[in-house]
Amino acid sequence: MSAIDTLPPLREVIASHQLSARKSLGQNFLLDLNLTAKIARQAGELSECDVLEIGPGPGGLTRGLLAEGARRVLAIEKDPRCLPALAEIAAAYPGRLEVINGDALEIDPLAHLRSPIRIAANLPYNVGTELLVRWLTPRDWPPFWQSLTLMFQREVAERIVAKPGSKAYGRLALLAQWRAEARIVMSLPPEAFTPPPKVSSAVVHLTALPEPRFPADAAILSRVVAAAFNQRRKMLRAALKGQAPDIEDRLISAGIKPTERAEQVPLEAFCALARELER
Ligand code: SAM
């Protein structure tokens, strides 16, 4: 473990603050500061940016982000047991770390952040995909963030970067690739975490595009792809029959064969269908 700062090693922090990991909070901690600094570097140039971090835990990634030069970090953590450890980091980086104790699904961080903003997190698995979908589906684009650098279970990361025709292709791939450039930038084995989870993990880096690849209303596109992939084995005319009484005609107008299955349909065609459904 290297000294990226003058704070104690994370194992000591965890022992002194009695931060035994809680499964209900998705707590699998990263204790290797070389690794957290490496993840922080994947987030891009940080010195001009505010960084929003969800679930800092004992602060390994937080320390990485600050050591890599983030202008400010706003960290939202649900577990109050982590606050004293985070306060020690805030004291070591005066004026650069703000911690909010609460549920990231319920807190609007915008009042606490100044543009440009990047998001970086080793996400709690139970809320990770929900947060990602929210960040990808605001009504207006570009969003408040420039990039997302997020740790997911490997299988979820693969769903984000999947291409049409593959088993992993679905709602996450479509929403992510519609408005962002998404790639897997790091893979981590279970042993990188304490305690080790059952599966491997990966870091996905998403850069917000200046505008979506194809025009569509975010709420309609989101609804249509959710319905299409909820019944992914069915033909689209059956999977989407609740979306419009004349769904077959609308599919044809969007250039999609009503007998096709969702996993064969590219992003451009789903966007065309969302526009058809808006008429
Ligand atoms: N970032 C730390 C690290 O890399 O070692 C901890 C990562 S751990 C996978 C997830 C963290 O998210 C835990 O600290 C957990 O308490 C926190 N958490 C879980 N649910 C949350 C929520 N809804 N809002 C904010 N934090 C949450």
Image: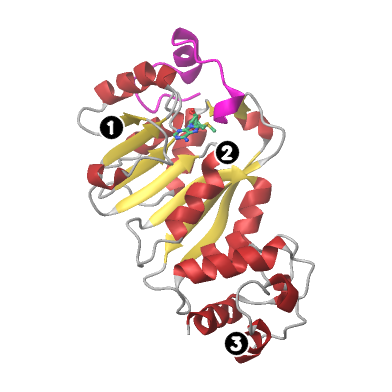
> Cα distance, mark 1 to mark 2?
25 Å
Does 130 appear above or below 57? below
- Say if the magenta span includes residue 242: no
Q: Which mark is residue 254?
A: 3
State the residue position of label 2.
126
Lower sequence index among marks 2 and 3: 2
Q: Which dot, 1 or 2, sits closer to the camera?
A: 2
Lower sequence index among marks 1 and 2: 1
Residue 28 in sight here: no
> Which residue does the image show at 66% across and 47% down from the upper left?
154
Neighbour tally class for label 3: few under 14, some 14-19, many 20 plus, Cα within 10 Å: some
Residue 186: horizontal and vertical position, in percent?
58, 47
- Say if the magenta span includes residue 15: yes
Which amino acid is tagged 1? Leu
- Element type at marker 2? helix
Lower sequence index among marks 1 and 3: 1
Where residue 187 sits, quadrant-wise, is top right
Which amino acid is tagged 2? Asn
Comparing 125 with 257, the one in front is 257
State the residue position of label 1.
97
Which amino acid is tagged 3? Ala
- Element type at marker 1? strand
Which SS does the magenta portion mostly show? loop
Residue numbers of the magenta segment: 1-26
